[in-house]
Image (tube, rainbow, N blue to C red):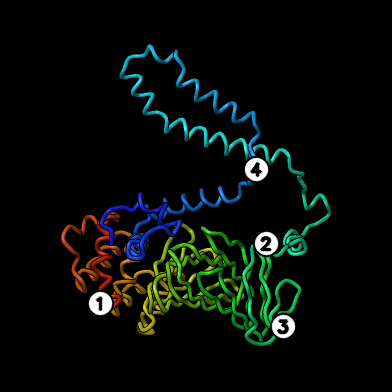
């Protein structure tokens, strides 16, 4: 795993240009580094915006402006400058080229959007934009292949006989006797179980996204982290290269079980990192709870749920700390940032008794939630989580 940030590798990583081993190392670093994950999101956004720009020939007048700009910097007026200044101008050719590229992008975007007919679906009497997209879709429109596994799944308003396509904006629904299998672009598959409802939100080189309103799905994804995402009413499930099941009930409460790799659950400014063999509950208006391993005791699970969602307080924390085993430091590590004061000190002490912190990680640093120390201790703890 990289010991330093991977900013310089992120662009190549996002484009799939790294060697397999280096790509895996970057992926592992991203799991525990929020700073690099934020930079990755910015790069993905830039790629996504660039992909949306239309291809159009630039008018001749624009090239004249670019040539004039280049000639301006190489004109005789600059020849009387001191050598150091001339050297600086020679060094600025890269900046001039970048400026020209920016001008080209800006002009192309402005040219396209000022010359295309604009329409407002609501003004046109259409209050269902999603249905309009379905009606005007073409074979070139973004879509995923869907196979019927049982019964008669519904895509939009059409029943799937053997196979079909799920276009961006469309809903896939299963009743009590139907199941379907979605091919997620070229990165994996998602099985949709009975009584489920999911929508394809986006599919591109930088993001494949579903929204799950209710039901149960099983995902098996082989892709770089943060490429496959599922929105639920209570949290966002971000795939970090893994396999998992996700259930959403009619109230919007969800339960995630990870069978391989990692999944991040994000909402309300909180992130829960859930590894293989672990689970996590989310609730509307509260976001993700604290992850726990599937084989924890019933007392541990019930107390943790009260602590997360039921104002369990000190009594629930007492049970969690008493029932915790070495690899339940997964739960305790997350709790460090979710409790305060004396309760955080108690969590620290229990963790330290189970697996002592590595060199450089201090009680004082953990009490103030030093990000570097938290990350170092997490790395030390992972051996117990996966042994």
**Which element carries disc 4, helix, strand or loop?**
loop
- Tell me which label, 1 or 4, sits earlier in the chain: 4
Quadrant housing the N terminus: bottom left
Q: Which residue is mark 4?
A: 56
Q: Residue 152, percent across and down?
A: 70, 84
> Mark 1 — residue?
326
Q: CA distance from mark 2 to mark 4?
A: 20 Å
Look at 39% across and 81% down and name the residue there.
294
CA gap between label 3 and label 4 equals: 41 Å
Q: At 22% from the left edge and 67% from the top edge, which residue is drawn?
A: 349
Q: Marks 1 and 2, how far apart in space?
A: 50 Å
Asked if one can make out residue 351 in the rendered structure from this viewpoint, the answer is: yes
N-terminal-most mark, 3 or 2 = 2
Q: Which mark is residue 141?
A: 2
**In the rendered picture of this protein, how many numbered marks are placed on residues?**
4
| Residue 150 drawn at (x, y percent) | 65, 87
In the figure, 11 relative to 180: above or below? above
Q: Earlier along the polypeptide chain: callout 3 or callout 1?
A: 3
Q: CA distance from mark 1 to mark 4?
A: 60 Å
**Residue 337 appears in the figure:** no
For disc 3, the marked residue is 161
Q: Is residue 296 left or right of residue 311?
A: left
Element type at marker 3? loop
């Amino acid at each position: 795993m990289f010991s330093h940030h991977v900013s310089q590798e992120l662009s190549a990583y996002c484009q799939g240009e790294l060697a397999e081993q280096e790509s895996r190392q970057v992926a592992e670093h991203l799991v525990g580094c929020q700073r690099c994950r934020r930079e990755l999101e910015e790069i993905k956004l830039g790629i996504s915006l660039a992909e949306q720009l239309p291809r159009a020939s630039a008018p001749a007048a624009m090239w004249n402006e670019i040539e004039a700009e280049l000639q301006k910097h190489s004109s005789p007026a600059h020849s009387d400058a001191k050598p150091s200044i001339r050297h600086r101008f020679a060094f600025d050719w890269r900046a001039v080229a970048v400026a020209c590229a920016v001008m080209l992008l800006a002009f192309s975007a402005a040219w396209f959007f000022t010359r295309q007919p604009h329409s407002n679906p609501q003004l046109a009497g259409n209050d269902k934009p999603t249905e309009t997209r379905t009606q005007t879709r073409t074979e070139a429109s973004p879509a995923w292949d869907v196979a019927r596994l049982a019964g008669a799944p519904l895509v939009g308003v059409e029943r799937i006989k053997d196979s079909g396509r799920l276009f961006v904006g469309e809903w896939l629904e299963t009743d009590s006797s139907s199941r379907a299998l979605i091919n997620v672009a070229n990165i994996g598959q998602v099985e949709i179980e009975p009584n489920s409802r999911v929508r394809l939100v986006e599919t591109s080189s930088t993001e494949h996204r579903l929204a799950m309103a209710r039901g149960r799905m099983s995902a098996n994804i082989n892709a770089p982290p943060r490429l496959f995402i599922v929105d639920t009413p209570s949290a966002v499930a971000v795939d970090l290269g893994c396999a998992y099941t996700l259930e959403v009930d009619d109230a919007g409460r969800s339960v995630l079980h990870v069978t391989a790799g990692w999944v991040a659950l994000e909402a309300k400014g909180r992130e829960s990192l859930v590894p293989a063999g672990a689970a996590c509950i989310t609730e509307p208006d509260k976001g993700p709870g604290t992850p726990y391993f599937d084989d924890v005791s019933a007392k541990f699970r019930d107390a943790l749920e009260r602590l997360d969602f039921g104002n369990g307080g000190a009594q629930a924390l007492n049970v969690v700390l008493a029932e915790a085993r070495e690899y339940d430091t997964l739960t305790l590590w997350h709790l460090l940032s979710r409790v305060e004061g004396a309760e955080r000190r108690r969590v620290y002490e229990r963790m330290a008794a189970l697996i002592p912190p590595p060199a450089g990680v201090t009680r004082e640093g953990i009490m103030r939630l030093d990000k570097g120390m938290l990350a170092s201790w997490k790395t030390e703890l992972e051996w117990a989580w996966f042994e």
